[in-house]
């Protein structure tokens, strides 16, 4: 687990996670807010995203009340994030929740080499996928401000 490196400066994984956490605040999902951030090979921010509906789509009344019924329509933060850059442009992704199996597969297809997350998602095969593809997958501890 990535731990706080110093009081003066955030580590790169902590920095990316802070961006992901801010991005999660934009999610319209009242039950689960997930954010993600991508950094390039020079640790520059190239994208942030969050879970939600397709851009420009306005949900009908009552849509958010049925948590199970709306799940199939939700775009995960990682999918939204990958739509913002080309394969090979991002080295590192931070996401507030461990990627689900499908999102982990997508991140692999985009050539991501490092993935950091805050919350564990037990239904995910991300650890096994990361191990097979040689991707660094690590949990980041919360930052004490």
Image (spheres, rainbow, N blue to C red):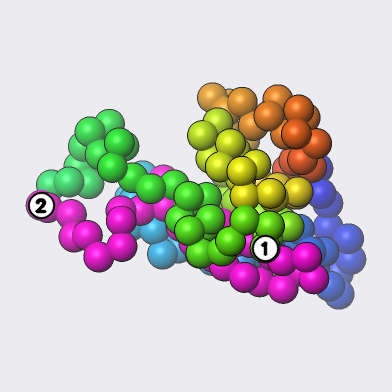
Sequence order check, earlier mark of 2 and 1: 2
Give the numbered dot on residue 89.
Answer: 1
In the image, taking residue 34 as reference, residue 135 lies left or right, namely right
The structure residue drawn at horizontal position 18% and vertical position 54%, both measured from the top left corner, is: 59
Is residue 60 highlighted in magenta?
yes
User: Residue 126 sits in which quadrant?
Assistant: top right
Viewer-side residue, 142 vs 96: 96
In the image, taking residue 53 as reference, residue 9 lies left or right, namely right
Q: Residues within 10 Å of mark 1 (few under 14, many from 20)?
A: some
Give the secondary structure at mark 1: loop
User: Residue 57 sits in which quadrant?
Assistant: bottom left
The structure residue drawn at horizontal position 56% and vertical position 64%, both measured from the top left corner, is: 85
Q: Position of residue 117 (x, y in %)?
A: 66, 46
Q: Say above or below: 92 vs 127.
A: below
Q: How many marks?
A: 2
Question: Can residue 116 be seen in the rendering of this structure?
Answer: no
Give the numbered dot on residue 61.
Answer: 2
* Magenta stretch bounds: 32-61
Q: Say above or below: 40 vs 100.
A: below
Viewer-side residue, 109 vs 58: 109
CA gap between label 2 and label 1 equals 39 Å
User: Residue 13 sits in which quadrant?
Assistant: bottom right
Q: Residue furthest right?
A: 6
- The quarter of the rendered structure image containing the N terminus is top right
The structure residue drawn at horizontal position 52% and vertical position 50%, both measured from the top left corner, is: 78
Q: Position of residue 81 (x, y in %)?
A: 52, 58
Is residue 43 highlighted in magenta?
yes
């Amino acid at each position: 687990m990535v731990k706080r490196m110093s009081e003066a400066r955030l580590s790169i994984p902590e920095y990316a996670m802070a961006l992901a956490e801010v991005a999660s605040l934009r999610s319209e999902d009242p039950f689960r807010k997930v954010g993600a951030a991508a950094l390039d090979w020079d640790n520059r921010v190239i994208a942030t995203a969050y879970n939600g509906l397709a851009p420009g789509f306005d949900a009908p009344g009552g849509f958010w009340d049925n948590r199970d019924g709306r799940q199939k329509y939700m775009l995960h933060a990682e999918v939204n994030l990958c739509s913002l850059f080309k394969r090979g442009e991002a080295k590192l992704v931070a996401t507030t929740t461990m990627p689900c199996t499908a999102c982990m597969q997508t991140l692999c297809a985009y050539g991501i080499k490092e993935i950091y997350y805050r919350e564990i998602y037990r239904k995910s095969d991300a650890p096994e996928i990361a191990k097979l593809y040689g991707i660094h997958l690590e949990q980041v501890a919360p930052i004490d401000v």
